[in-house]
Amino acid sequence: MKRFSFAALLLVATPAYAEDGLTLSANTRLRYETIEGQPRAGFNESDDLLNIRTIVTAEYRTGRLKLGAELYDSRVYGGDAGTPITTGEVNTLELVQAYVGYEAPDAFGPGAKLGLQAGRFTLNLGSRRLVAADDYRNTTNGYTGIRADLALPDDLSATLIYTLPQVRLPDNRPDIVDKRVKFDRESFDLVLWGGLATKKLRGKRGAIELSYFHLRERDSPKLATRNRSLDTVGLRLYRDPAAGRADFESETFYQSGSVRTSLAPTATRLDVSAWFTHAEAGYTFKHPWSPRVALEFDYASGDGRGGKFTRFDTLFGMRRADLAPAGLYNAVGRANIISMGLRVEATPSKRLDAFAAYRPLWLASRYDSFSTTGVRDTSGNSGRLAGHQIEARVRYWLIPSASASNGTACCSPRGDSCAMRRTLPMAETRYIIRSTPRSASSRGAWQRPAGFCDLGHSR
């Protein structure tokens, strides 16, 4: 059994401006996927799906004040009852962003700047492993609340948030498949607050970052939950790549709190003790192609047999930059996984870039389901090895406003000792992407989409 997925995308970038006045822009992406040998449990062995995402953005600036709005329209076509179509693929005519922002220079003395934002907005904080606006996925994450950004002397900065994460609606399959329009809901039944503080290190290529986020969730008349109450504290140290220099990144999260064992109101409540770590070391050679080689390691705890819940929850984090694509693939995420990886990147010209990566995959806990596949052997007899993943991408910018991009991800469980092979009859997983972005804006020159880094490696 083999899985093959092909994606074609049409993008229109959203440039960023600091001048006063009104900016209008649009973004459309088309992605076609086909799959054989589905690695996730409970879905068709083979499938086809067409994803279309359109974004219209408007921002008005006057002095220190700015007003912004962004409309998302995410739809899919094709598939049947066994196709994994969820709110990760469909969210029609949704006003994800509608905010007011204010910038106050010298708010707390010379050299100190304060930025405030209130309303509906997207967030990309720190490494984006906990709080992100997912760009690869057909839909994104939206948040309603308040954000404060503080820049201080001596290369210190901080970001604080108090938000109600938006729950994408509709959330029942018939309405999702019918692409019914329903405004997303935010309420105090789901709250995310916290922030991070960053200190730039000498040379300003590196930084140290401390983060803390609290997620509180409770049942509502319309939605049963596991009543998560999670505290996640993180420490990150990194140095950005540069020609002829070594770079590195290390980030670790520890998660505590409590969670119910199921959606039932009477379900047992367990204490949480989970953790995640990412480590990476790379080197960029002095060469016209800027080749970079990196070794990577990821560990996310899984749930065991003890009296505590130990499966790491990545909250609203992205997966593409570190691990694997979403879409019909969506099998490898930041939960119950151990992975070591080798990545090679190159930029032969301003119009051409490429990367290739290989990583074997293991289960952190052999009793828990592997990552986000839903494949589980509660006896633990299938072992820890899940398979091997190989991915690559070549992207060429045809003209300044359009590119063709081809990529593939392949996950193959090998050997009779492989846990995935023993619990799900599959042989290989493949994923291929082709993309063509172009830009339209009411003013200014074209820029590459800021979120486009999600198709490859990104900090």
Image (cartoon, rainbow, N blue to C red):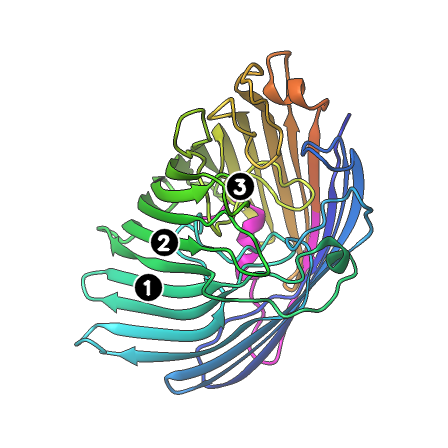
Q: Amino acid at mark 2?
A: His
The picture places residue 188, in percent across and down from the top left corner, at 45, 65
Say which mark, if any, is on residue 214.
Answer: 2
Classify mark 3: residues with Cα within 10 Å, few (<14), some (14-19) or many (20+).
Answer: some
Tell me the residue at 73%/48% (across/down): 7
Mark closer to the observer (3, 2) = 3
Question: Which amino acid is tagged 3?
Answer: Ser
The residue wearing badge 3 is: 262
Left or right position of 7 against 307: right
**Height in image: 126 above or below 68?**
above
Report the span colored magenta: 434-459
Name the amino acid type tagged 1: Leu
Q: Which residue is mark 1?
A: 160
Residue beneath the point at 53% across and 63% down: 166
Q: Earlier in the sequence, mark 1 or mark 2?
A: 1
Residue 434 vs 153, above or below: the answer is above
Q: Nearer the viewer, residue 274 or 404?
A: 274
| Mark 2 neighbour class, 10 Å CA radius: few under 14, some 14 to 19, many 20 or more | many
Q: Nearer the viewer, mark 1 or mark 2?
A: 2
- Cα–Cα span, label 1 and label 3: 31 Å
> Residue most toward the front?
266
Q: Nearer the viewer, mark 1 or mark 3?
A: 3
- Specify whether residue 454 is painted magenta: yes
Return the residue nearer the eye: 403 or 63: 63
Instruction: State the SS at label 3.
Output: loop
Counting residues from the start of the chain, the first of labels 1 and 3 encountered is 1
> Residue 160, image x and y in percent?
32, 63
Tell me: 432 left or right of 13: right
